[in-house]
Amino acid sequence: MVDHLANTEINSQRIATVESCFGASGQPLAIPGRVLLGEGILTKECRKKAKPRIFFLFNDILVYGSIVINRRKYSSQHIIPLDEVTLETLPDTLQMKNRWMIKTAKKSFVVSAASLTERKEWISHLEECIRHLLSKMGQQPPTEHAAPWIPDKATDICMRCTQTKFSTLTRRHHCRKCGFVVCGDCSRQRFLMPRLSPKPLRVCNLCYKQLVAAKKESEEQSKTAHSPLVGYEPSSGDDKDTESN
């Protein structure tokens, strides 16, 4: 079905419409073999509060953005390759129902659908596209994922020291490793995590210690793997055979 739609005029027109809705701020989406399979509005859990976002499912990517004028204008385009995606169904909360998590190595976040049926349909179509793409590329599902950020309103105190209370003057920060909401004193360190950013990112003190320890262990293992054999002494070049002839 997807292959049949790939080179059709209707598919090209649908993709062109999505491109025009994002305008100059969006990236071109039309490439050979790409098919737009569906679209819909999902609620995305953001740092401050949950917000509606438009999502477009293609056979190889997931695109989403902010809604300026529905079906006419969108902004803040994000493109996620489906071969990097893993899905996780989540339980309902008092604030949000029909939730699931979209996880990648660079970013993970929670979305919710308007109904249980809609969630099942989204997850079913996403999983089918992911399976087909991974099979086509000969890849295994990804195993590393970024931690989702816990929303600001989830806690009034630092989730590490559990002492500092947040206020207008005491800001909330997020650890880029674990996603916890932490105070400034508990997140003074920065650490380079190349899969997330080319620049060092804010991490909480506990994650910083774990990251430093893991880096040190990795460096020591690398040195051991490339070092000469332990206990081996190179020959001076002289034969010192003491056995009698």
Image (cartoon, rainbow, N blue to C red):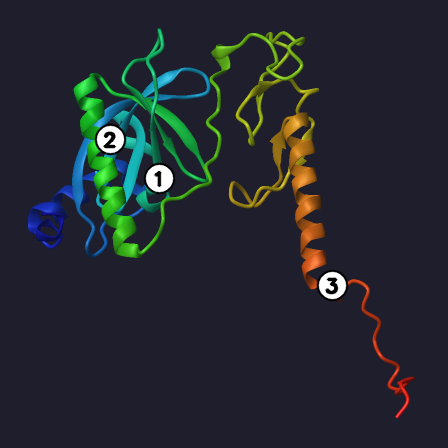
| Quadrant of the snapshot with the C terminus | bottom right
Residue occupied by mark 3: 227
* Pointers 2 and 3 in contact (C-beta within 8 Å): no
Residue indicated by mark 1: 85
Q: Amino acid at mark 1?
A: Val
Q: Residue at x 17, y 35 (%)?
A: 38
Helix, strand or loop under label 1: loop
Dot 3 lies on which element?
loop
In the rendering, at what x and y percent does residue 184 appear?
Answer: 67, 20
Q: Which class describes the residues within 10 Å of circle 3: few (<14), some (14-19), or many (20+)?
A: few
Determine whether label 1 and label 2 are within 8 Å by CB: no
With respect to residue 169, does 19 lie above or below? below
Disc with the residue nearer the chain's start (1 vs 2): 1
Residue type, label 2: Ile
In the rendered image, which residue does mark 2 sit on? 123
Q: CA distance from mark 1 to mark 2?
A: 12 Å
Residue 93 in the image, given as x and y percentages of width and height: 36, 10
Seen from the viewer's position, the closer of residues 25 and 165 is: 165
Is residue 72 in view from this perspective? Answer: no
Of all residues, the one furthest to the front in this rendering is 245
Task: Reply above or below: 165 against 91.
Answer: above
**How far across and down, in percent of the image, does residue 227 sit?**
74, 63
